[in-house]
Amino acid sequence: MTMTTQAPAEACDLLIEAGWVVPVVPHGMVLEQHAVAVRQGEIVAVLPIREARQRFEPREVVSRPHSALIPGLVNAHTHNPMTLLRGIADDLPLMEWLQGHIWPVEGAVIGPQFVADGITLSVAEMLRGGTTCANENYFFPDAQAAVYKRLGFRARVGLPVIDFPTAWAKNDDEYFDRAIEVHDQWRDDALVSTAFVPHAPYTVSDASFERIRMLADQLDMPIHLHTHETAHEVEESLHKHGQRPLARLDRLGLVTDRLVAVHMTAVDDAEIALCAERGVVVVHCPESNLKLASGFCPVGRFEKAGVVLAIGTDGCASNNDLDMFGETRTAAQLAKAVAGDAAAFSAASALRAATLGGARAVGFEDRIGSIEAGKRADLACVDLARIETQPLHHVISQLVYAVGRHQVTDVWIDGHRKLEDGRLADLDPDALIANAREWRSRIASIRID
């Protein structure tokens, strides 16, 4: 008689059991009654709940039988310190909004404390909406990085370059010197990395772009750039440089798989094909583009060409929120209207853009963006038992077209609990609100001549 012995249970830190796991890879798949096992911040297995209970001996079990477990959402383009400027200059076109209101107010308040307080408020908002990673684009990246690290939030922090003095740097050499200093400080960090963020083609010289290209190649860094945001920008580039912005960037060697091109509303078929050929990631910010009347990114055409798409909220001064569920729904719906095709940018494609596409934009696709063994446990749990998501026929469709961010119950980053039953684990909401009100009073006192 042969005796069989059961293998001893494997230890793990966390076992999350969900009614549905949406791994994003494979595309469009939904796994019913599955669990995700986490050890030392890493996903070690995705398997049926019954098998998970036999195989693992977890320190903690979280059971969410009426919820979908998804990869944490990735906000692929944002200016999070500007959350403190939410609503100060609405209903204005881009250049009037930027030059006549935002830049003057920023000039009066910008500094490390403004940046730190704005990011702290933003992290709380993002966590409550299932976002676990941000592609940041703002000044004082040293202060940004320190706050993201302290809060345990994953981020790619931008190293700004712009052709005029700011509180961060006074000239070209200082912008680059400070950029390298911040990059060197954070180059080996597990949560926070850096990218070059030249502001836009109309505010950065050829010489600075060439310098960025050389350093990005040497240091293996992305280049995160607003470009082709409006038709006016394209016209201005033709007048000043004799080329459209993307053609100018290509002449300078920047149109490569390092380029993260944000907005991309005013593009032609040749530019879409060039992005596909070179591996450019395009970040769609539909609500900001709509609010500033900047134009429509032809997402359906980019998708058909094979371009990797990501989704960003932009900053709260032009959106006015950091709601990635709302942004993803707008992106999917707007893509259909622009394409004249109800099948364009499906719910599964939109969710992929908000997760794995964002991870690609940030350069973290090897560690986040999908629920796979070997990736980090950046995860969000969404309660689908609410009235707003009943009846439940198709999980991914509900996530994109019906879910509100208030349905996010639990969030983990690197396996650490950041939101539990809708409550922030590490942040005090009352203190955040009090601080935001102090900034409101200070900003309200600023006079713009």
Image: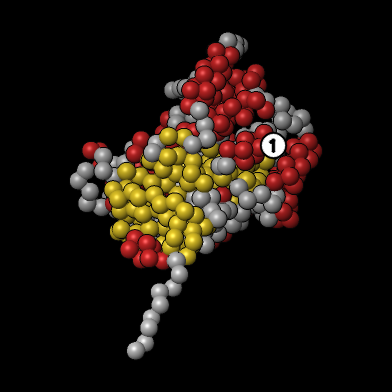
Color style of the picture: secondary structure
**Residue shown at 62%/46% (left/top)?**
192
Q: Disc 1 designates what residue?
A: 142
Q: Quadrant of residue 30?
A: bottom left
| Residue 213 percent location from the top left of the image | 70, 51
Residues 289 and 197: in front is 197
Amino acid residing under circle 1? Asp
- Note whether 447 is above or below 265 in the view shown: above
In which quadrant will I find the N terminus? Answer: bottom left
Count of numbered badges drawn on the protein: 1
Which type of secondary structure does the marked residue at label 1 adopt? helix
Q: Estimate how packed mark 1 is, as few (under 14), some (14 to 19) or many (20 or more) residues with alpha carbons within 10 Å.
A: many
| Residue 429 percent location from the top left of the image | 48, 26
View extreme (bottom): residue: 1
Q: Quadrant of residue 165?
A: top right
| Residue 59 percent location from the top left of the image | 47, 53
- Note whether 437 is above or below 405 in the view shown: above
Residue 231 shown left or right of residue 178 in the figure: left
**Residue shown at 66%/49% (left/top)?**
189
Residues 152 and 203: in front is 152
Please indicate, yes or no, whether residue 432 appears anywhere in the rendered image: yes
- Note whether 107 is above or below 149 in the view shown: above
Residues 387 and 301: in front is 387
Residues 61 and 113: in front is 61
View extreme (front): residue: 1
**Residue shown at 21%/43% (left/top)?**
390
In which quadrant will I find the C terminus? Answer: top right
